[in-house]
Image (tube, helix red, strand yellow):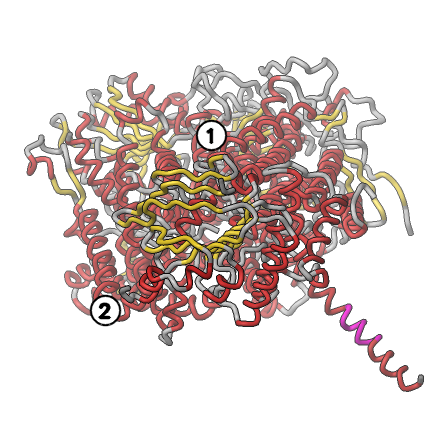
Amino acid sequence: MGILEVKNVNKRFGGLQALGDVNLSVAENTVHAIIGPNGAGKSTLLNCLVGKLIPDTGSVMFDGQSVLGRSPYEINQMGISRVFQTPEIFGDLTVMENMMIPCFAKRDGAFELNALNSVGNQKDIIERAEHMLEDMNMADKRHMHAASMSRGDKRRLEIGMCLSQEPRLLLLDEPTAGMARADTNNTIDLLKQIKQERDITIAIIEHDMHVVFSLAERITVLAQGTPLVEDTPDKIKGHPKVREAYLGESA
Amino acid sequence: MDAIILQILNGLDKGSAYALIALGLTLIFGTLGVVNFAHGALFMIGAFCAVSMQRLLNLSYITLDETQKDFLGNPLKVKTPYVESWFGPDMGAAIIDWSVPLAILLAIPVMIVVGIVMERGLIKHFYKRPHADQILVTFGLAIVLQEIIKHYYGANPIPTPAPDAFKGSFDFGVMLGFDPNAIIYPYWRMVYFAFAVVIIGAVFAFLQFTTFGMVVRAGMADRETVGLLGININRRFTLMFALAAAVAGMAGVMYTPINSPNYHMGMDFLVLSFVVVVVGGMGSLPGAVLAGFMLGILEAFASMNQIKSILPGIDQIIIYLVAIVILLTRPRGLMGRKGVMEE
Amino acid sequence: MSKFHVSRRGVLRTGALAGAGLALPTYLRADTGYLNAPTGSSVTLGFNVPQTGPYADEGADELRAFELAVEHLNGEGDGGMLNTFSSKALQGNGILGKKVEFVTGDTQTKSDAARASAKSMIEKDGAIMISGGSSSGVAVAVQGLCQDAGVIFMAGLTHSNDTTGKDKKANGFRHFFNAYMSAAALAPVLQKLYGSDRKAYHLTADYTWGWTQEESIAAATEAMGWETVNKVRTPLAATDFSSYIAPVLNSGADVLVLNHYGGNMVNSLTNAVQFGLREKQVNGKNFEIVVPLYSRLMAKGAGENVKGILGSTNWHWSLQDEASQAFVKSFGTKYGFPPSQAAHTCYAQTLLYADACERAGTFNPCGVVEALEGFEFDGLGNGPTLYRAADHQCFKDVLVVKGKDNPTSEFDLLEVVEVTPRAQVEYAPDHPMFAGGELGSCNPGA
Amino acid sequence: MFGLQKKDTTLLLVVAALALFAPFLLNPFPEGSAMAQFNAGYPDLMQRFVIFGIFAVGFNILFGLTGYLSFGHAAFLGVGSYSAVWMFKLLGYNVIPGIILSVIVAGLFSVVIGYVSLRRSGIYFSILTLAFAQMSYNMAYSVLGNPTSNFNLTNGETGLQVYTSDPQILASAGAPDLPHLFGLTMRSSYQLELGSWLFTFNAGYYLCAVLLLVSFYVAIRIFRSPFGLMLRAVKSNQQRMNYTGLNTRPYTLAAFVISGMYAGLAGGLLSTMDPLAGAERMQWTASGEVVLMTILGGAGTLIGPVLGAGFIKYFENIFSKINEGVLHAWFGFLPDGLENGVIWVVEHFVGPGWHLTLGLLFMLVVTFLPGGLVEGGQKIAALLSRRKSKDTDNRATQSTPAE
């Protein structure tokens, strides 16, 4: 039984079958990659996992509990954190403030009317956020305006923010899309390091095969909304169906 | 039944005014991304083009009539318009009589100039600024414009009658087999409705069938991409603004016989037209037009005695009530696109 | 240099003690015993008129009249109605020998703004009297303020019954006529011209003034046999009245009464004429439109549409009596056009106030109130007039006017059809339309 | 101090000092001088500065922090005003129940409107709030205010006021017949004459000033709290909020209700200073005014809204009162032709033209100072300090060679 179990999920948009009978099981403490050509339904699937979309049929269970019908913030509080394709951070706030917000969410839950205490008095939060910034090698940037950082740093910050919540499942949506090679490699190293240091499950949607094969322990190939195969990276590399889906070659 | 037909007619007419203003607002918002609180002022300036035309045609020379006295007991100053002395009294009077339609000729160039000056002089500096700043600066501009008009034309409404040929009303009732006087409708209001339909049609045709229009529509869909295509978007923006100003101005001219124009008529329309635009959906031209007519008709229905006797005061709040219901059931208005002005 | 002393006005100005000013222990009473007592060689009046918003033109005309009145009071100009006024207390040397100065404020035709600017004139500029205004809401609001503060309020244009009805105040005085008087004057003329078998349809602006006007006209016309078919309330903010006017013809009514003022009136009348109502025949009679409260400034906005339409007005420049002529002459000479009824009322109110001070020998509001209450005068343009003590309403002749068919100038829009004598428009102070309020006692504010 | 950082404490103390000494600061010109026209130190205007300051500070908690632009906050101001007057009518003229009720009622009203309106964001939210406020205004002006009906909640156009026939059940025999705080009437003033200067200290003003300081203090605490941080996060990126396990709806609703309560307090104080509540307090122009105050002063800054409120109220009350006579007094020293010329020009901008001046200033400020008046102040401060630091730089460079 994996930590994330997707069973018979279907999703239609009008006449388009975006997801057809998707079954997926992500085992705890693994890195699981979902790959597939454009329009394969990767993003739709991801959105079904985090509460942005609700599948027409089927079930999505996280750690034995259904996520369906819950809002994104509830699903996050269950232990799923999401990293976006383009980094979603609080651009108007400082790096330190960015890091503190998930810490508050972890400590106080989805809503807390803590209106008269000073942020400066929240020692536990500050300590935790600073610790996390050090982990991310960003301690020197703590007073920077988040929007003014490089894309790589934004990505690093976003991942740090997700990790500070100690999620059990980290979802990454094409984390290196649009990045230069060097930044991509840095991100790969960062993710490897994270995996080594923590007990965490990572599900990653990715286009870039270099990233996928550097990180993934298992790979699911999605094509036209349906899982084609699921296997280890080595097996996937030579799989004829994958070549067909990606390159249009007939086997 | 006849009462309902009557109110549909009224609603179409009210709706024409809303739709025309909302159309211009949406053009500016959709292409330029600017929330223009001065749009009502453009409508008002258009209306005062009609007043100016009327004054222009009424420019007179003065003769003293010793047989009559003015209010101070001095000989009465009799004014004879120059056009009457140039073209003869009948022809002259006819020209003056037609001053409102003739004012369109004045309004188009004036509004285009006003639009270009406004866009180049002020609005273009606000493309990248937050919507709140755009609202503040255009609101300031609206105040300035209306104060200038007030200074020259006073605060009272100024009568600008329709040509005699369009005075009175047409009896639809007889035509449809109802009693006489059951459904009467003024000729000028029919002209106004027809005019609105023509203008709206022309704007849509312009956007649909010209290359300029195509670029503009593409710009409305995705501004950045069009900018990347190397098309000189700035000049087109200016022209778009001028076009929207001209639409508002012509709508203003034609509206003057319906209600005598005054300097604050733009503000009176402003809030309502924003409600119309938003109910239609930000950035959607068909939405703006549809919402304009829909709210106009609902407003007309709400003022029926039969409805007011059940819900007193409903006519005071109907537009806002409908706006609330629509926005709660359709998150982005009738035809709004996702992500526009939602942040 | 740092002389540190409490000013003469500087005692604790407790409102609690207001109203009982005369009963104060002497040590608490300032030497003058009333608020803003003029100490120097001049006295300050506060003119509070709409300078922005839809009534700005009317406000501007009021201000012109005030300036003219101040000129005349100070002995400048030709003296205007000072020469025709029946009371001869005014000398042309200011009021009680003090030169008249004035401050102005903008009511914006909003109760809040009007009270703010009146307060600023009282608190900052030391105005001892407030006058002006162009709507009943503002008049009632400012009148209440003046009562509380302890200065005199000489109302400008306010036509609602409430101003001297349920909202009457001891410190407030109204020269302008009211809705009841309009109705009482109009009804007989309507009967004479249109007969007593008529069906009336009311369109009424949905706020206090509109309601009192509708109530008054309906009562007066029903009393002479008319039937009221319908009373429809229209939103104040309405600009296009088509949807209210369109059903009128089919309702069986043959008279349309427009209980509208200002922009509402211009638009509703224009719309009604547009719909061709005036050319129609209903019940075998010509369809007629009535505008109970006319204002020449506003009639101008409706242009040709006013022709032949009946209404009432407080005063009109074409009146031939000596006083009106004198006023028109000095106003017209100074500004180049004839004064409006609002201007006339404001001018008359200023003179009446000044005269009352002279006769009382003091600026003390209580003295002024005493001098004005029950004051009978003539020579201010409306014939013999009474300031009734019971409600501080002026009683005088009322003009029934009609839109002129062949105007000779842009000012020549109305013609007087009948001057309804004062006796015909009088009513008891406790008439149901005016009942409810209490005048209270004068408040000198200190 | 007060649990604030040093910078905020200083700001609070500065505001406190300004509020305390306002009667002096606002009356810089001697009585009777030509410049006395610009004095603003009379009770009514001082009260308005402070009351609209409270209104704008509260509005800024919503708009400045979360970015939600409400076009309907005047509704809460109006509801607060009506509540206070109703307390005067029913209980008596002591101001405490009125002020408390105005905050509570405005709070409840804003819960309802906020709950519905916050289902949408951006301009859709703005229009929803506008629609609610305009409905309230139109109803208050007409249907809910008809004196002849049994349900006269607002007294329509005339405005809600206290009549002698009202019950006032808690009013004791000797209590003043005007709003008062345990016998101290809001209108009572103490005047101090210093040479030719006249300063007025008004009880009502000081009550408002104390409440402004409390409001301002609470606003600082909110700005610096985790809640305030969350509100800024809402403005910055709602998507990230949601995916960080935070429910934005209660945060925005709480901000909306808090700012609604501030508006209610301001409304209640308006009635307390002057017990007549008019419907036009709820009109869209009044809602627009607080938006303008906040943006003009500097949205999202602490002191900005207070400055903006003062700025607009000053224009409304001082510039509108300058008439031709005043201008002649000012420019009388000029030769006649020039005098008339100058007056002709100036006349357009004062008296009836004060709207024109205000409109021009909106345009100038927003064009050249996007951060509002606060940014203007910062620029000036920066200019001064740059000059100063340039001096020190010069000194530094000069001293370097000597070493």
- The residue tagged 2 is B210
Q: Chain of mark 2?
A: B
Q: Is residue D387 magenta?
A: yes
In the image, which residues are magenta? D385-392
Residue found at the very far bottom of the displayed protein = D401
Q: Is residue C19 magenta?
A: no
Q: Position of residue A127 (x, y in %)?
A: 75, 49
Q: Position of residue D200 (x, y in %)?
A: 77, 41
**Which residue is pictured at 45% across the width and 45% down the height?**
A25
Say left or right for D72 vs B314: right
In depth, the one of B188 and C12 nearer the eye is B188
**Tags 2 and 1 both on a single chain:** no
Quadrant, the N terminus of chain B = top left
Question: For mark 1, does the 10 Å Cα neighbourhood hold few (<14), some (14 to 19), or many (20 or more) residues?
Answer: many
**B106 over D121 or under it: above or below:** below
Residue D140 is labelled as 1
Q: Position of residue D389 (x, y in %)?
A: 80, 72
**Which residue is pictured at 47% across the width and 30% down the height?**
D140
Say left or right for C361 vs B3: right
Could you tell me the amino acid type at mark 1?
Ala
Say left or right for A242 vs D202: left
Q: Can residue A98 be seen by looking at this rendering?
A: yes
Q: How many marks?
A: 2
Question: For mark 2, does the 10 Å Cα neighbourhood hold few (<14), some (14 to 19), or many (20 or more) residues?
Answer: few
> What type of secondary structure mainly makes up the magenta span?
helix
Q: Position of residue D353 (x, y in %)?
A: 53, 55
In depth, the one of D272 and B29 nearer the eye is B29
